[in-house]
Amino acid sequence: MAYCTSSQHLQALVDALARPAPPGSRGAIAAKQTRRIVEQGWATSAAIEDLLLLMDRRLDPYGAGSVDVLSALFDLPWRSVAYRPSRLAIDVVLHQAMAASDVAQLLIHLEACGFAVDPAPMVDALMPGLRQRQMLDASELSILWFERWRHKATPMAIRADNRAVPAELRKRGTTPSGYRIETWHCIDGNLVELRIRAPRYRRRKPPVETKCSVCGWTWFRGDPESSQIHRREHKARMRYIDPQPHPRVLSALERGEAPSWVTSTSPPWKHREMYDRALAFKREFGYSFVQWGSELGDDDPNVQGFLFLDARAAIIGACAFRLRGDAPSQWWGLQWIWLSPKHRRNGHLGRQWERFKARFGRFEVESPLSEAMAGFLAKQGDSRLAGELFAAQAASTLPHDVPRFTEG
């Protein structure tokens, strides 16, 4: 992490860190000031100055501990706030203040610089209000991760705003809390950079962007949260990439039912299976939307879905037909088809092809066609069903009484 401040403030920080650490903070008074800031939710500049001096007297408000300079250094905002007005009030006085979470962030930064401040009491007081929050700002994230990264954060550099390039390491040192300090100077001898390394910092390999060859999910190897998301997504996608016998399909087959066809009135589980395959189709071919209503259903009365089954009663793919055109000239269109990769080129579509033609008549295979689909149509002798060829003949050759169906 790199920050920028004035040359004068950078020198003040170095001088303060060079002095012996105070024998101990005035803990009871500092704790009282911390509670007051947390209860109010805000702190004025004067309140923050008092807290810093109570924790580490090297943080003089006219030097290293200048609150306005520190807030600019760490990009911590000031806001206009007012005490809650009474029922009879007609105006308020606004004060510049910093949110309590940003004060905690300031303490975390100052501890990471090697000063003898303790952010833990304020972090502990603010943490309960963050546990159930779904969105957090940068300061709140620092509070959430404080214990995990305390004394382990990546090295910090504070540079002078004159933009001079560091050329020479002049001094090394270690603070009482174990932070290692380096001062760097330019060719003319002026201080231009302060580098600080946490005592428990360990260099980690940067996360590597990785695409799973099985499920297609892109994640960052070495990032625990990204890895966890990948494991969850991988498990969900394997339901249709490597499908297993489906209990509801088995039950339907035992009752002598035909579980493959899906209409707008079909049970929700069928719509979820259709949606999963439509989503897989979208992802694989890079389309902009999913061509099935939702996991809850598709309310188009003129839609016919079909679930491909293997001998084990696993759902290995799906396709969807929709009624196209306006009466009296209408036709069915095969909108999309997706089979799990391991079940492709095994004749599953070929075994259903005549069944589709018998059910839908002369239907269109809608564009754009993949190379595999174009090859399949050519093999079947049905290239005339491809989108553009079909459309060119549609007006004069299509029958007017297009079959309509309910589930069956």
Image (cartoon, helix red, strand yellow):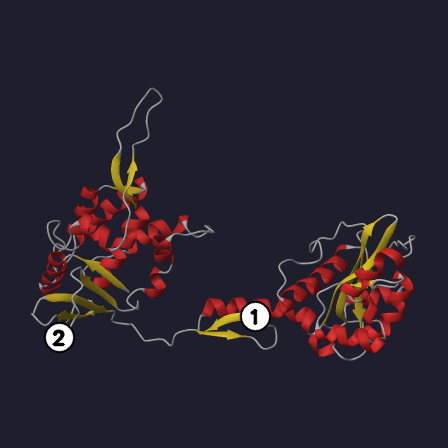
Q: Is residue 254 visible?
A: no
Q: Is residue 125 above or below residue 362?
A: above
The N terminus lies in which quarter of the figure? bottom left
Q: Position of residue 401 (x, y in %)?
A: 92, 53
Q: Is residue 20 left or right of residue 199?
A: left
Foreground residue, 277 or 286? 286
Foreground residue, 140 or 286? 286
Q: Amino acid at mark 1?
A: Trp
Q: Earlier in the sequence, mark 2 or mark 1?
A: 2
Q: Residue 168 got which mark?
A: 2
Q: Is residue 16 above or below residue 341?
A: above
Q: Amino acid at mark 2?
A: Glu
Tell me, yes or no, whether the two marked residues, 2 and 1, touch with CB atoms within 8 Å: no
Q: Is residue 140 left or right of residue 407?
A: left
In the picture of the structure, the residue carrying the numbered disc 1 is: 217
Q: Position of residue 283 (x, y in %)?
A: 62, 66
